[in-house]
Amino acid sequence: MPASPDTGPPPSAIAPGLPGAELVRDGLSDLRAGRRSPSALLVSMSSERLRAAGIDVPTATIADAPAELHRLLERNEPAAAHAQYNALRRRLVSFCEAAEHYARRRNR
């Protein structure tokens, strides 16, 4: 099933077993639906890197996603917001690194 700007990649387009894949899948879905979830904000933050790894990220991303993510986390749990933000960023970086490695191997 080919990807399109409206529907994005089929779930199988994201290699199974990559760390943080569920965050990216959820974020892509939320972005397409117009939801400003933590996952959507994370995907927006790394949209260029995800596209470079072969992930079809919608062109309409969320401006100032890092600050908005921090505010969202702070509203939900003020004392833990900074730690949660850093943990989410680390998971996203792990996904990006793994997806880039997977893309390089796939393109050999």
Image (cartoon, grey):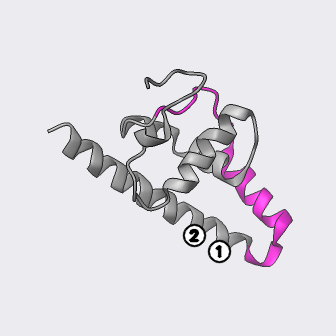
Q: Position of residue 9 (x, y in %)?
A: 48, 32
In the picture, the quarter occupied by the N terminus is top left
Q: Residue at x 52, y 39 (%)?
A: 47
Q: Is 25 positioned to the left or the right of 79 in the image?
A: left
Q: Residue at x 40, y 53 (%)?
A: 16
Hey, what amino acid is under mark 2?
Ala
**Residue furthest to the right:** 75
Q: Is 75 positioned to the left or the right of 19 in the image?
A: right
| Residue 68 part of the magenta segment | yes
For the residue carrying disc 2, how many other residues have a C-alpha within 10 Å: few (<14), some (14-19), or many (20+)? few
Hey, what amino acid is under mark 1?
Ala
- Image quadrant of residue 70? bottom right
As drawn, the label of residue 87 is 2
What count of labels does the image hold? 2
* Residue 6 visible in the current orientation: yes
Disc 1: which residue: 83
Q: Is 64 positioned to the left or the right of 24 in the image?
A: right
In the picture, the quarter occupied by the C terminus is top left
- Image quadrant of residue 58? top right
- Asked if the residue at tag 2 contacts the one at tag 1, i.e. Cβ–Cβ closer than 8 Å, the answer is yes
Front-most of residues 100 and 69: 100
| Relative to 44, residue 18 above or below | below
Q: Secondary structure at mark 2?
A: helix
Q: Residue at x 50, y 65 (%)?
A: 90
Q: Residue at x 36, y 40 (%)?
A: 53
* Residue 49 visible in the current orientation: no
Q: Position of residue 68 (x, y in %)?
A: 74, 50
The magenta stretch spans which residues?
56-80
